[in-house]
Amino acid sequence: MQKRDILLKIYNSLYNYFGPLHWWPGGSPFEVMVGAILTQNTSWNNVEKAIKNLKKRNLLNPDAFYYLSQEELSKLIKPSGYYNIKAQRLKNFVTFFFEEFEGSTEKMFSGDSEELRKKLLNIKGIGPETADSILLYAGEKPFFVIDTYTKRIFSRHKLISEEAAYHHIQEFFYQNLPKEVKLFNEFHAQMVMLGKTKCTSKNPDCPKCPIVYLKKLE
Ligand code: SF4
């Protein structure tokens, strides 16, 4: 079976099993970008608590966020873990956002997406996974997000190497899938769901997994 056919089969099996997941679980593009940084090294449940704190004070908009002190921000995002580091990263990001795009998401996403990706990667604390999450979920640009779950699932079935670098794994998807925002969005969401519920780091629940047939293809 061709890799493209395998990928689409996996996608269809997961979609049929879990249903549409409607990601990203955030509101405005700005909120998605903040969430993409907050979710580094933590679960979404913890991010939600931090987002709730920011929303309660009406701070989840570019202007209010820009003027918020790093100290105050640190306190509000405490539930997301690594809050001092994340407050610094969020400040780095929002400074960039205003300097480059005057705090406008329309301006940010209206130019060349590859150029924007390079700029995002130059911000201290923003790596490829965060940059691609911002591009895909806030900007609706066709960038495939590679995370721990995707790496784990695909390497367990030897579709990618366990040691493969981020951009190599991403290339695997680009070479074998049509570059479509909706597909990339839902595929990543399905990977996360599978990684959390079946393909866990210890004791994966293979007998109940919707893509257990991959074992026969190895
Ligand atoms: S749970 Fe098992 S069958 Fe499912 S993706 Fe993980 S390793 Fe494969």
Image (cartoon, rainbow, N blue to C red):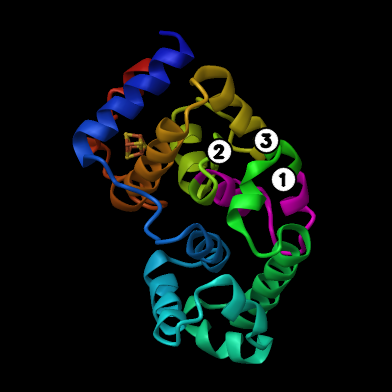
Amino acid on which disc 3 is placed:
His
What range of the chain is rendered magenta? 116-136
**Horizontal side, residue 128 vs residue 201: left or right:** right
Label 1 beta carbon less than 8 Å to ligand 1: no
x and y percentages locating residue 7 in the rendered image: 41, 22
Residue shown at 67% from the left, 35% from the top: 167
Q: Is residue 42 left or right of residue 123?
A: left
Label 1 sits on residue = 116
Quadrant in the rendering for residue 51? bottom left
Quadrant (top left/top right/bottom left/bottom right) for the N terminus: top left
Mark carried by residue 167: 3
In the image, 182 versus 58, the foreground residue is 58
Q: Is residue 152 above or below residue 28?
A: above
Closer to the chain start, of discs 1 and 3, is 1
Q: Main secondary structure of the magenta part?
A: helix
Q: Residue 189 placed where, x, y %?
A: 38, 45
Quadrant location, the C terminus: top left
Ligand 1 occupies quarter: top left
Q: Amino acid at mark 2?
A: Lys
Task: Please name the amino acid that badge 1 sits on.
Answer: Leu
Q: Nearer the viewer, residue 35 or 200?
A: 35
> Residue at label 2?
141
- For mark 1, give the secondary structure: helix
Which residue corresponds to the image point at 43% horizontal and 38% vertical from the top-left?
153
